[in-house]
Image (cartoon, rainbow, N blue to C red):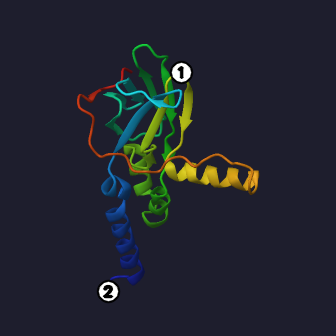
């Protein structure tokens, strides 16, 4: 009995899809390094204690500093306190990464399901500047660049449109004393 070529081709495609499934989990991981700075009235405000919290847990750091957080589909809430100054809060938006769509196309959706469940399909901003005394929302850099482009188009030339969000990569060194604890459920 001769093997059916169509059946073999289909099995080969399924096997290839299984091999590339969960691509973002493999290539970028399920954690995200985020750099946090604090300012007050436009001036640097070093030494603030910040709590970063999402559905996956809670991390604390001193500014300026970095912390590793678990990627999730939920936004990252950041609260910073500095002695003698008002509290600052920021919401770091969680957004779907472009890789997820490649998983849907090439992995038949299995990889997308794996990446969404593990958090690897999502991203946060690399850098957040929390303004003490204010509450702000920060988008991941690639999303912010698109928002800035659209705002500039709406504003037209020479109208003083908003400056683009900083896109410099943060230092890759975690802050001394950064701690992690599971979120209370």
Q: Secondary structure at mark 2?
A: loop
The residue tagged 1 is 133
**Measuring 69% from the left and 53% from the top, which residue is drawn there?**
152
The reply, left or right, for residue 78 in relation to residue 20 is right
Q: Determine the image quadrant of residue 10.
A: bottom left
Q: Determine the image quadrant of residue 24.
A: bottom left
The N terminus lies in which quarter of the figure?
bottom left
The reply, left or right, for residue 127 in relation to residue 67 is right
The residue tagged 2 is 2
Residue 81, given in percent of the width and then of the height, sits at 42, 19
Please report whichever mark, 2 or 1, sits nearer to the chain's N-terminal start: 2
Q: Nearer the viewer, residue 3 or 97?
A: 97
Q: Secondary structure at mark 1?
A: loop
Relative to 164, residue 81 above or below:
above
**Measuring 53% from the left and 43% from the top, which residue is drawn there?**
139
Q: Determine the image quadrant of residue 4.
A: bottom left
Residue 180, given in percent of the width and then of the height, sits at 28, 28
């Amino acid at each position: 009995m001769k093997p059916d070529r169509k059946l073999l081709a289909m099995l080969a495609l399924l096997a290839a899809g299984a091999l590339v499934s969960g691509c973002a989990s493999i290539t970028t991981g399920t954690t995200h390094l985020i750099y946090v700075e604090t300012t007050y009235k436009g001036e640097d405000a070093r030494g603030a204690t910040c709590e970063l919290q999402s559905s996956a847990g809670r991390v604390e750091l001193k500014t300026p500093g970095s912390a590793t957080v678990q990627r999730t589909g939920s936004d990252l809430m950041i609260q910073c306190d500095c002695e003698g100054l008002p509290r600052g809060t920021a919401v770091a938006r969680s957004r779907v990464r472009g890789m997820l769509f490649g998983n849907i196309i090439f992995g038949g959706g299995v990889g997308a399901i794996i990446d969404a469940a593990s958090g690897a399909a999502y991203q946060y901003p690399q850098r957040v500047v929390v303004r003490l005394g204010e509450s702000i929302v920060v988008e991941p850099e690639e999303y912010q660049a698109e928002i800035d482009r659209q705002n500039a188009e709406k504003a037209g030339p020479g109208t003083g449109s908003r400056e683009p969000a900083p896109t410099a990569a943060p230092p890759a060194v975690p802050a001394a004393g950064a701690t992690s604890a599971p979120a209370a459920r």
